[in-house]
Image (cartoon, grey):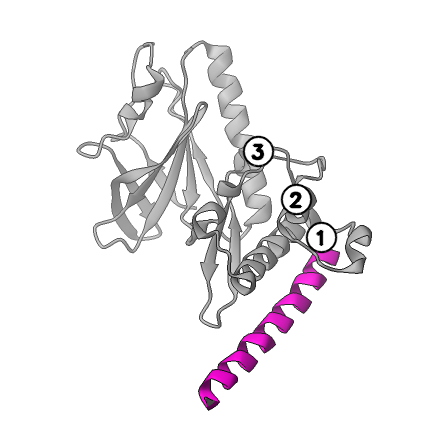
Amino acid sequence: MPRYNYGLIKSPQTPRKVNRNTAGFIFQRSTSSIDLLEGKDETKLTFVSHYSQGRVAQTGLFANASNSVKRVVKQPVIFNYGPNVIAAEIQNFKNERDKWNIYYPNNPAILVTDASRADGGIRLILPWVPGKTYTNVATDDPLLRSKHLLAIACAFLELNEKGLFFYDFNEDNVLLDENADGTFKAYLIDFGGVGKTTCGQELGFLLRHVSCQTDRHSHIDSIQNIISILHERIAILSSHNIAQSNVHRTR
């Protein structure tokens, strides 16, 4: 198993009040790094950029010099360093790690802690996955939009089939990456908002975004229904685009 040493990631050693606007002080570009040992190849990963700064957690991207090894590191934003708070944060991050690893068994996350640190040294080390958020790739093109939604629907179906369900989903929790054949792969991220009881958020999201101009709309009661509709829509739109292209070519 990979061994991680977080000795070079700065973290307060004594309790201190943290301003929400400056909570990113832990990820200092000049000093923060990870010593990563995978097998026999030791690589130092240094801080590249913030991914997100939330109310309860922040994430940063780390990479080696050649950018061939990348990791996303998530850590809690802690304002109270009491032992019960630290213990609760560690349990929350363990739960998130376990849910990530159920969904991505071949690309697991690793949790490290350090009891010598005031903040518990809590770091969730996540594999980097490619793509842009659904918010960033939003488009009015009906074919492209249908391809995006199909990828997301397939990812949701896989998540649900593994007994996991979003209870705090937003459009930044999914990354879309285009394949060579023009299809898309969706990667779900941020499993802090994932539980084991369905809230219907996945189906609700798809119903809001899939404007099904069909008599079957009232019968859509599952993600499988939506996947079938999207496959049909993509086939129709693709054929239409080919026909239009042929018309323009003959003029």
Q: Is residue 10 magenta?
A: no
Q: Earlier in the sequence, mark 2 or mark 3?
A: 3
Q: Is residue 107 left or right of residue 220?
A: left
CB within 8 Å, label 1 to label 2: yes
Q: Is residue 230 magenta?
A: yes
How busy is the neighbourhood of tag 3: few (under 14 within 10 Å), some, or many (20 plus)? some
Q: Is residue 248 left or right of residue 143?
A: left
What span is in magenta?
225-250
Read off the residue under disc 3.
193
Q: Which residue is nearer to you in this view: 179 or 72?
A: 179
Read off the residue under disc 2.
202
Work out whether 208 lies above or below 22: below
Q: Amino acid at mark 1?
A: Ile
Badge 1 element: helix
> In the image, residue 72 lies at what x, y percent?
38, 41
Residue pictured at 71% horizontal, 35% vertical? 199
Work out whether 183 lies above or below 7: below
> In the image, residue 117 lies at what x, y percent?
34, 18
Specify the quadrant of the image occupied by residue 79.
Answer: top left
Please identify the dominant SS of the magenta region: helix
Work out whether 205 lies above or below 197: below
> In the image, residue 230 lies at what x, y percent?
66, 62
Badge 3 element: helix
For the C terminus, give its image quadrant: bottom left
Read off the residue under disc 1.
223
